[in-house]
């Protein structure tokens, strides 16, 4: 995991004063580190019958789509408001630096389908929780979540549902 840590860049005061932004673009640009990252993200979910990986817009798409391919699962995008064609359902949520709304197509998942929710960063946890709620509202089964980075000081893990696994590759 040291290679991944070394390729995450700290950007102070972005996108707002007081936020230490974790920039994952150097990690994405490094073929070996990105590949290792996807392998490590997939590890807990192999042989678990995952039918779909739900990636959260936009950085969650990058990791989620690669994981879906590696797991032999489908990819389902959880998108910001107004981006998916109807019919959709949505939830409003707060994140470390603002408010937003996440949506999913109402026919995107089958009832009971096993789903992993994926994002790049867990900060306050509002985004990941919104993703879980959307999937569950369609009657699919969230088996857990994966993130590359957990900002442990913001306690987002406490917002994730009690007994569902939440895997983070690196923590700060
Ligand atoms: O745990 P939280 O406090 O909810 O924050 C985490 C979310 O914040 C960032 O997304 P952002 O909304 O900035 O979107 P982006 O991926 O399009 O940059 C990040 O990619 C996570 O989705
Ligand atoms: N500090 C941070 N860096 C990168 N993405 C984030 N999403 C929420 N907080 C973030």
Image: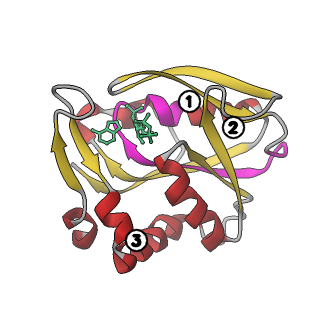
Instruction: Rate crowding at label 3 as few (under 14), some (14 to 19) or many (20 or more) other CA atoms within 10 Å.
Output: many
Q: Vertical placement of 122 versus 69: above or below?
A: above
For residue 98, say whether it is visible.
Answer: yes
Q: Which of marks 2 and 3 precedes in the sequence?
A: 3
- Read off the magenta span: 109-129
Disc number for residue 135: 2
- Find disc 1 in the rendering and name its residue: 130
Disc number for residue 18: none
State how far apart marks 1 and 3 are (Cα). 26 Å
Q: Vertical placement of 105 versus 30: above or below?
A: above
Q: Is residue 167 left or right of residue 130?
A: left
User: Is the C-beta of the residue carrying label 1 under 8 Å from the nearest atom of ligand 1?
Assistant: yes
Q: Vertical placement of 1 versus 130: above or below?
A: below
Quarter-of-image position of residue 151: top left
Q: What's the residue at 50%, 49% (across, down)?
A: 60
Query: Which colouring convention does the figure follow?
Result: secondary structure
């Amino acid at each position: 995991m040291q290679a991944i840590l070394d390729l995450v860049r700290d950007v102070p005061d972005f996108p707002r004063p007081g936020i230490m932004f974790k920039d994952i673009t150097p990690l994405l640009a490094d073929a070996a580190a990105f590949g290792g990252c996807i392998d490590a993200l997939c590890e807990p979910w192999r042989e678990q019958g995952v039918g779909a990986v739900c990636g959260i817009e936009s950085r969650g798409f990058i990791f989620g789509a690669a994981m879906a391919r590696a797991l032999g699962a489908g990819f389902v995008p959880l998108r910001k408001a107004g981006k998916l064609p109807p019919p959709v359902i949505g939830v409003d949520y707060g994140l470390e630096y603002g408010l937003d709304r996440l949506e999913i197509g109402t026919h995107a998942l089958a009832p009971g389908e096993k789903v992993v929710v994926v994002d790049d960063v867990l900060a306050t946890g509002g985004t990941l929780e919104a993703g879980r709620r959307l999937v569950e509202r369609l009657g699919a089964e969230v088996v857990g979540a994966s993130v590359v980075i957990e900002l442990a000081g913001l306690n987002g893990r406490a917002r994730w549902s009690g007994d569902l696994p939440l895997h983070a590759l690196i923590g700060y």
